[in-house]
Amino acid sequence: MTETAVPRVLVVDDDDNLREVMTLILEQGGFQVKSAWDVNSALGLIGCQTFDVLISDLHMPSAGDGLTVVSAMRHSNAKAVTIIFSAYPEMKAAASAILAQTDDIIVKPANIGNLVELVREKLLKGKSPPRVLASLATILEECSEATIDDWLSRVRKEDQVLTVWLDDSIRSAHLPQLLRDLVFRLRHPQPLGSRALASPSAAEHGPARRVQGYTASMMVEESRMLQVSIFQPSKTT
């Protein structure tokens, strides 16, 4: 990007209202902005256009969607500044693994009025130099057992989930294959613009939980705790 060029920003978020507000704020701040509502549309734009900045939600309909978009941007334009949003405050403290791939993480709801200032600051500093770390897939594969143990310890402390009593082995039975599916997806990314294959383990998990008596809110909370367990800082030390 030259000094006179207008920085180009890609905003990715499945929340229509938030995506539109961020786009408007960035445009008023002097940026050229394109937006995408899901991974496939984001990958399509990344594959055919050049961007100086990526701002993406971490938690979209499928697990790992935000990191899929970040990875695609890294491969397409390694110099682009990448900023991700997370709806969960715990992710700010557990962001070490994520920050190996991104330049900043913002917890929703954030004061997006400061978004223009943040983007300008990141562009002025330039992209962070790459860190030599093990791939996320390798870290996740090596720490799968520890991840499951950490997740179980979090679940045991959550009264909302534990209103349905399950033996630990039954409660976590889906996780080994789910984590293997996630590792495979990270190591074998789909071509830009293609639809990623769904995890069979994840597809079976929902119906099984309903039979076990889980409510939708319980499943969401359980999923949230798994995301925190996957990205906890101890995985990267």
Image (tube, rainbow, N blue to C red):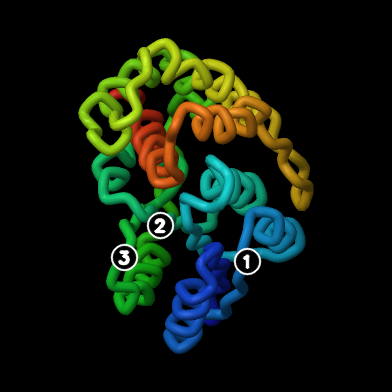
Residue located beneath label 2 in the image = 85
What residue lies at 28% left-to-right and 47% top-to-bottom? 92
What residue lies at 72% left-to-right and 41% top-to-bottom? 196
Q: Quadrant of residue 178?
A: top right
Q: Quadrant of the N terminus?
A: bottom right
Q: Which mark is residue 36?
A: 1
Residue 232 in view? no
Label 2 element class: strand
Q: Residues within 10 Å of mark 1 (few under 14, many from 20)?
A: some
58 versus 24 height, above or below: above
Q: Mark 3 or mark 2: which comes first in sequence?
A: 2
227 versus 74 height, above or below: above
Residue 229 location (% of width, % of height): 35, 29
Q: Which mark is residue 109?
A: 3
Mark 3: amino acid: Pro
What residue lies at 49% left-to-right and 29% top-to-bottom? 136
Q: Residues within 10 Å of mark 2 (few under 14, many from 20)?
A: many
147 versus 25 height, above or below: above
Which residue is at the front of the view, 119 or 204?
204
Mark 2: amino acid: Phe
Is residue 37 rendered to the left or right of residue 220?
Answer: right
Q: Which mark is residue 67?
A: none
Which residue is at the front of the view, 46 or 234?
234
Residue 85 location (% of width, % of height): 40, 57
Q: Quadrant of residue 152?
A: top left
Spatial separation of the CA atoms under disc 3 and disc 1: 19 Å
Q: Mark 3 or mark 1: which comes first in sequence?
A: 1
Is residue 94 rendered to the left or right of residue 3?
Answer: left
Label 1 element class: strand
Residue 203 location (% of width, % of height): 64, 33
Spatial separation of the CA atoms under disc 3 and disc 2: 9 Å
